[in-house]
Amino acid sequence: MNKNLIIKNSRIDSDHLNILIIDDNEQITKMLTTFLELKKHKCTVANDGKQGLILIHENKYDVVLLDLAMPEFDGYAVIKALENEDMLKNNKIIVFTASTITKDELDQLVSRGVTSYILKPIDIDLLLSRIIESATS
Amino acid sequence: MTAESLEENMFESDNPLNELNRLLIKYDLTPNQAKVYLYLSKIGIKTASEISKSLKIPRTETYHLLSTLQQKGIIFSVFGKPTKFNAVGIDESIVILVNNEKNRIAELEIGKADIIKLWKTIPKYTGNKEKLEDNKFQTLQGRNSILVKLEQMIKESSENILVLGTESDFKKFYHTDFTNLLKKTKSELKILTDYPNKGIHIFEDVPSKKIKKLDDKSREDFCFIIKDDSEVIFFISNSRSKDMIAIWTDSKTFVITLRSLFSLIWKKAHHIDESNAESLLGSEITYEHRLREIEQEKNILNYLQKNFKLSENKLGVKNE
């Protein structure tokens, strides 16, 4: 881990980020929550897009980790709904996906207002640093 | 054009009257009845003998045709010797023919109760003990017989209706109660269709969340409708065929097979208001996708176990 990252980490750790995870994979959400809470961040989980969208409307999150492939109301539907309400750019949305989506398609999402994207699987330290980068960008 | 030349060319293959003749058959006219009616509509007042000669229909048959058309109310006779005939205008005639059909159906409805009452008075023959509960098959030929069965299935459905087929498969049901019933059904409705970007959509009145788009790979030549996981109609002839043929069955094997196929495609498909890229993604929730998810789970789990000494049980992790 490089020096800058440690500095960043320590600064953000004390900031207690408020993170929303929207993912239908309960194992990932449970473990990720455990990990992030151990790192002193506050985590909220929504297991589908609809629930996630309600939480975004009702609360202010520093970062939203959004899975794309979920049954029924998926990540795309969340992005579209936020876009329609001009709320996409006001939220730090990180697309967190295991789908074999192309880089062009992911870049297209960023140009629409998504903050960044992370492809699964990713090393957990790197994931945290990406969350922090997005939260502080 | 003179009346004589008009008469000569009337029923030649390229004349639109031929198409009209075909269309009128749908209104319960025989080809020759439609021919006589169209002839009188275009040529005007004529005797039976003149009609017979011009249309090359035997005289006795011509009298019979004229009598039937009079009973239907779309031609009338002019008193004189010999009696002459003329046609009621096409607009009015169509209204009359439609009303005739409506009245006939109303009479059939009224007669239904009498038939059932009479039927119940006849003791049931109990010699044949063969069980006929499952595996019934019925061949449905022609748009009307298919439509009647489809409407019956939708009306009787109480759980779910699954529809799979391209727009062109269903275009023959435009202006029927089919889509109206789908729109009103209280059952859970799922439609998988191609939903092309241009043109009128047969399912446009159905809420978009109930429709998913068939991708090119799944757009095969099959079309079926499943009711309550217990009955299915599947089309034997595809949208390009002129004649519609379908099979209705309550065979569990058939229903389960088609139900599984539907579920598989539905899971991969995306809703119609999503872009192409999004649809592509939807079709990729596959084995590879799952593997990446598992790999991600492992990454987090390993980290937690290594750095925080947390057990799998404590983390609530299920074994795959």
Image: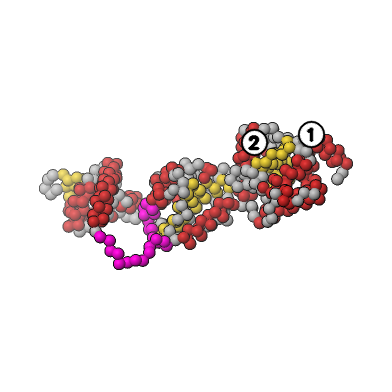
Q: Which residue is mark 1?
A: A15
Question: In terms of depth relative to the viewer, which is nearer, B114 or B314?
Answer: B314
A12 sits left or right of B23 in the view: right
Between disc 1 and disc 2, whose residue precedes? Answer: 1
Residue B292 shown in magenta: no
Q: Which residue does the image show at 44% across and 56% down from the upper left? A: B231
Give the percent coordinates (x, y) of residue B113.
26, 50
Q: Which residue does the image show at 78% across and 42% down from the upper left? A: A38
> How many numbered marks does the figure carry?
2
Question: In terms of depth relative to the viewer, which is nearer, B66 or B136?
Answer: B136
Give the percent coordinates (x, y) of residue B206.
48, 43
Is any atom of residue A108 visible in this view?
no
Span highlighted in magenta in the image: B123-149
B306 sits left or right of A62 in the view: right
Which disc, if any, is residue A55? 2
Q: Residues within 10 Å of mark 1 (few under 14, many from 20)?
A: few
B63 sits left or right of B175 in the view: left
B13 over B130 or under it: above or below: above
Mark 1 and mark 2: Cα distance apart in space: 21 Å
